[in-house]
Amino acid sequence: MEKQDIVKLSKQLLSQPVPGIYFLYGGEEFLKRRFLSDLRKTVVPDDVADLNYAVVSGPDQADKVLEIAYTLPQFSDSRMIVWYNSGFPLPQQRYKKKIEDTVDTVKDFPYLYLMIYATEDEFDPTGKDGRAALQRPELRPLGFEKLPPERVLGWVRRHFEAEKLDITENDARYLISRAGTGMTELSSSIEKLCAYAAEKGAGSVGRADIDELVAQKLEFSAFFISDNIRSRDPSALLAYVRDAKSRAEKPQVILGTMISEAEKLYRIKLAQKNGMNYQSAAKQLGLNEYVVKLAFRSVSEVPEKRVLRFLDACSEADKKLKTSSSDAWGTLIQLVCSI
């Protein structure tokens, strides 16, 4: 599936909304929720929202969704239903038939916007089943993945400008490096920094303020893996795993991310080996050009066999987590130490 520019696509959909079944997935909750809110305001105005907007949650809510969907919109051309935690498009077997039947029934309702909302933990678009699910003809899949640093840099600076605070480009980059590119986390950090500056009566935010208020968050990326593989020093990757454990993240999700990024890194390595430049590789692989550019630099010093060996080790760890009751975090740490 071709890589989406989700910011551009969101704007297009908001300018010319079309009823249907939308599947919102990915780890960038800020953009996902903003799109959902903006679309609701566009197709179901505030003064009729109580009559035409509904929220349900759970895979057992198919009958409720169907009941609401059959109700014609009142004083409006559109009705919107937001369905959280449905399990769709890969529902558990006991809910599968009812959910499938409901989706098949309402897919062509000319007034209905059925927004199926999945968190990053609930749907993996990289696996075989996930990729196949995104090809379903009745779905309008929208993948809200976290943006690379260059894409959020201007957004960060505009937030400070709105509060009449100065921040240099370098310090804005430093903030992103500490907080990560997740816009929810960044927004929270910006809010704290603005409040701190106001309390001090300062007209700007600098690196010392960022160090004072923003905790370091380790972000995962293909070049983060390659740096560790190249140096054969697992310390940074171990720190990432321990940081994730302290935040009570799911080890299966962390491993899934590691596998996804290791696969991406291997594909980039092969493209480099075949003489491609990063622009051609990005186009062929359907990846963000900036990400590929950074990975190209990092992977150039990593032997192909070493990347493949780590990818194989990831797959073995995945099998172990799925087929045994062993300590999941211990398996992850053992994997990292195998570098």
Image: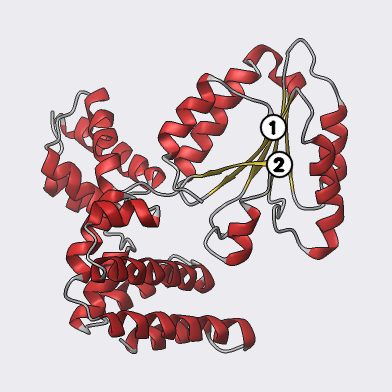
User: Dot 2: few (<14), some (14–19), or many (≥20) neighbours within 10 Å?
Assistant: some
* Residue 156, image x, y percentages: 27, 36
The answer to the question of whether label 2 and label 1 lie on touching residues, with beta carbons closer than 8 A, is yes
The answer to which of 138 and 152 lies nearer the viewer is 138
The answer to whether 272 appears left or right of 95 in the picture is: left
Q: Which amino acid lies under the numbered mark 1 shown in the image of this protein?
A: Gly
User: Dot 1: few (<14), some (14–19), or many (≥20) neighbours within 10 Å?
Assistant: many
Q: Which mark is residue 20?
A: 1
The answer to whether 311 appears left or right of 211 in the picture is: right
Where disc 1 sits, the SS reads strand
Relative to 308, residue 8 above or below: above
* Residue 219, image x, y percentages: 32, 61
* Residue 56, image x, y percentages: 74, 41
Where disc 2 sits, the SS reads loop
Distance from the alpha carbon under mark 2 to that under mark 1: 8 Å
Residue that protrudes farthest toward the front in the picture: 274
User: Is residue 243 in view?
Assistant: no
Q: Disc 2 designates what residue?
A: 138
Q: Which amino acid lies under the numbered mark 2 shown in the image of this protein?
A: Glu
